Amino acid sequence: AQRQHKNWLPRAAMNTVAEMLDMPRIRVYEVATFYTMYNLAPVGEHFVQICTTTPCWLRGSDDVVSACKNKLGIDLGETTADGKFTVIEVECLGACVNAPMMQVNDDYFEDLTADSTAAVLDALARGDKPKVGPQGGRHTTEPSGGPTTLTDFMGDG
């Protein structure tokens, strides 16, 4: 229902879900208000969720937040005047190995810097589809450098 309503879940849609599942409306409202993946108010075409929990914060999520604020001219929790972008801060999105990261609609962008964050936002603003996944040269979740085994880490001794 949320996908059919441009990234948000109106009350009428929740009521229809309750009817389809033959359950009280309050049960649907409870789920929708508990989980952060449900938006109960309209959001931008590009719904940007920035992880700021410990692993992402240690790896630079503050830079990702700043890049979004500077590039879009809005603060966390706001939507651009043209309705194209909404940016929020969220708890862990489960991609800690490639921190810092953000989710835009259904896509993950990982290993972000201020520059790569701005590049993703620029591409979206142009209507392009930016490359998803790691933005720092990794293919998936392989180590970004340094030792790759405990033996390598400990050395010969």
Image (cartoon, rainbow, N blue to C red):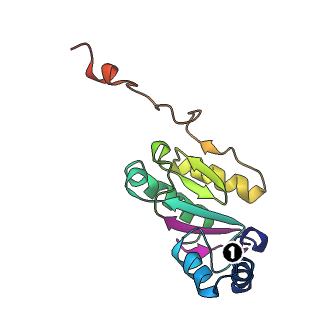
Which residue is at the far front? 22
Q: Quadrant of residue 147?
A: top left
Dot 1 falls on a residue whose secondary structure is: loop
Tell me if 30 is positioned left or right of 122 in this view. left
The percent position of residue 23, horizontal first and vertical second, equals 65, 82
Residue at image x 41%, y 47%?
A: 59
Residue type highlighted by circle 1: Trp
Residue at image x 50%, y 52%?
A: 94
Quarter of the C terminus within the rendering: top left
Q: Is residue 77 magenta?
A: yes
Tell me if 136 is positioned left or right of 58 in this view. right
Q: Which residue is mark 1?
A: 8
Residue 104 sits above or below residue 147 on the image: below
Q: Quadrant of residue 149?
A: top left
Tell me if 57 is positioned left or right of 141 in this view. left
Q: Quadrant of residue 14?
A: bottom right
The percent position of residue 32, horizontal first and vertical second, equals 59, 76
Residue 44 sits above or below residue 62 on the image: below
The percent position of residue 80, horizontal first and vertical second, equals 66, 73
Residue at image x 68%, y 44%?
A: 131
Boundaries of the magenta span: 75-90
Which residue is at the far top? 156
Q: Residues within 10 Å of mark 1 (few under 14, many from 20)?
A: some
The percent position of residue 57, horizontal first and vertical second, equals 40, 54
Q: Is residue 124 magenta?
A: no
Which residue is at the far left? 157
Query: Which residue is nearer to you in this view: 48 or 107?
Result: 107
Residue 124 sits above or below residue 98 on the image: below
Quarter of the N terminus within the rendering: bottom right
Residue at image x 53%, y 47%?
A: 112
